[in-house]
Image (tube, grey):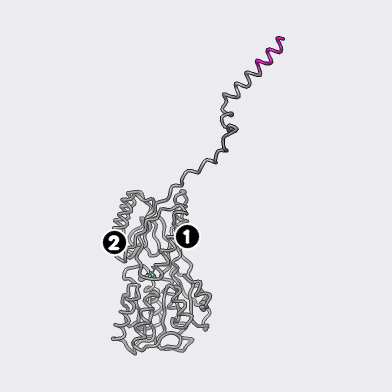
Amino acid sequence: MKKLFALVLALALALSVAACSGGASTTPAPSAKPSAAPSAAPQKLIKVGFAQVGHESDWRTASTKSVQAALSKEKGFDLRFVDCDNNSAKQLEAVRSFIQQQVDYIVIAPIVSTGWDTVLTEAQSAKIPVIVLDRTIDDSTKYVTWIGSEFTNEGLAAGAWLKDYAKAKNIKDLNILVIKGTTGSSAEIGRTKGFEKIAKENGWKILDQQDGNFTQDGGQKVMESYLKSYKDKFNVVVCQNDNEAFGAQDAMKAAGVTYGVNGKVILISFDACKAALKQVLEGKINADFQCNPLQGEFLADAIKKLAAGEKVPAKTYMKEPWYVAEDILKSITYTNNAGQTVTEPLIKVTQAIADAAY
Ligand code: AHR
C-alpha cells in the first residue's frame, strides 16, 4: 500500500513539473486554429539619393531606367531621384539635400568633372559614402567607387577605325568637323583626347570643334553653323553622341549634303543606342562606338556589398563594343589609354543587334 502511494505521488509530481516547464503553452487548445508562421520583420530599405545629369539623350534615358530598375523598392532600396537638367548648381543642391535627408548612400553622375571637393567633404563629414556613376570626378577622391566608361578609349577607337577605313577606301585627305559633348564633362574630355591623339599622329585636319551639349538640338545648331563656314570643305563629321548625330543629319539633309556609306561625309557617332544602330544598319551612320548605360545592376551590387561591410573595386569599367555599317574591316588595333596595344573586333550591325540595343 505504501509502495502504491509513493508511485501515485511521483506521477503527480512529474505531471506538475511538465506543466510548469512552458512546453504545454505551445500546444494549441483543441478548438484553436493553427497559429500562422511569425511574419518576417519588414526589411529596412537602403536610402539612396541619385543626382542624375538630366535627360539630354537616349543614353541618359536608358541610364535612368537602368538605375531605377536595379534600385527598386522590391529590391530593397528607397531611391530618391533628382534630374539635374544639365545644371551644375542644381546638381550640387541635390547632393546637399541628400546630405540633409541623411540618406545611406549618395550616387552622382557628374555633369562636369570639377567643382566637387567641397560638397564631397560635406558628405564625408556626414559619413555618407558617395558613389560616382558614368562620368568621372577629377578634382576629388572623396568617393568610394566609380562605375562608368573609358571615354578616352572610345575616342581612340573611333580614330583607329577612321584611319583604317580611310586607307581601305583610298581616301587621302581627311577634313574633320567635331561636334563635342558638354564642355568639361569627362565624356567630352576623354573622347576629344583620344580622337585628337590619332588625328595628330596622322596629320588630319580638324577644322573645328564646338559644343553640341549632347543634345539633338545642339547637334543641329552646331552643324547649321558649320555648314555656313565649311560647306564643301569637310568630309568627316564626328558627333560625340547619337543625339547630336541625329541633329547633324537633319542639318546636312536640309543643306543637301549627303552622309553615310553612300554619301560624301563619313559620319561617326558614340553611344550606339537603338535608334542610332538602326541608322548604322541603313548605312546612314558609318560607325558607332558604344557607351554602355546599363550600369544599374553594378551599382546595386556595389551598394549591397558596401552595406554588408565588404570591399568594392575602386573602378568598374563597362564593356563596350564598336559597331560599323560595312564589312570591309574586321577589327582595329590601337594603343589604349592604359598604354596596351589591343586588337578589338568591329561588329557589323544586323537587324537583331539593332533590335536588342538599349
Ligand atoms: O556621359 C555619357 C554621355 O552622356 C553619353 O555619351 C551621352 O549621350 C550622355 O549625354
Q: Give x and y (percent) for residue 342.
A: 50, 72
Q: Amino acid at mark 1?
A: Glu
Quadrant (top left, top right, bottom left, bottom right) of the N terminus? top right
Give the vertical position of 5 relative to 151 (above or below). above
Is residue 165 part of the magenta span, yes or no?
Answer: no
Q: Which residues are magenta?
A: 1-10
Give the vertical position of 329 relative to 213 (above or below). below
Q: Give x and y (percent) for residue 196.
A: 37, 77
Q: Which residue is mark 2?
A: 90
Is residue 2 part of the magenta span, yes or no?
Answer: yes
Q: Is residue 21 left or right of residue 78?
A: right
Mark 2 residue crowding within 10 angstroms, few (<14) / some (14–19) / many (20+): some
Q: Is residue 1 left or right of residue 333?
A: right
Q: Amino acid at mark 2?
A: Lys
Q: Which residue is mark 1?
A: 297
Q: Indicate the quadrant of ligand 1 in the picture.
A: bottom left
Residue at the outermost front position:
31
Residue at the outermost top position:
2
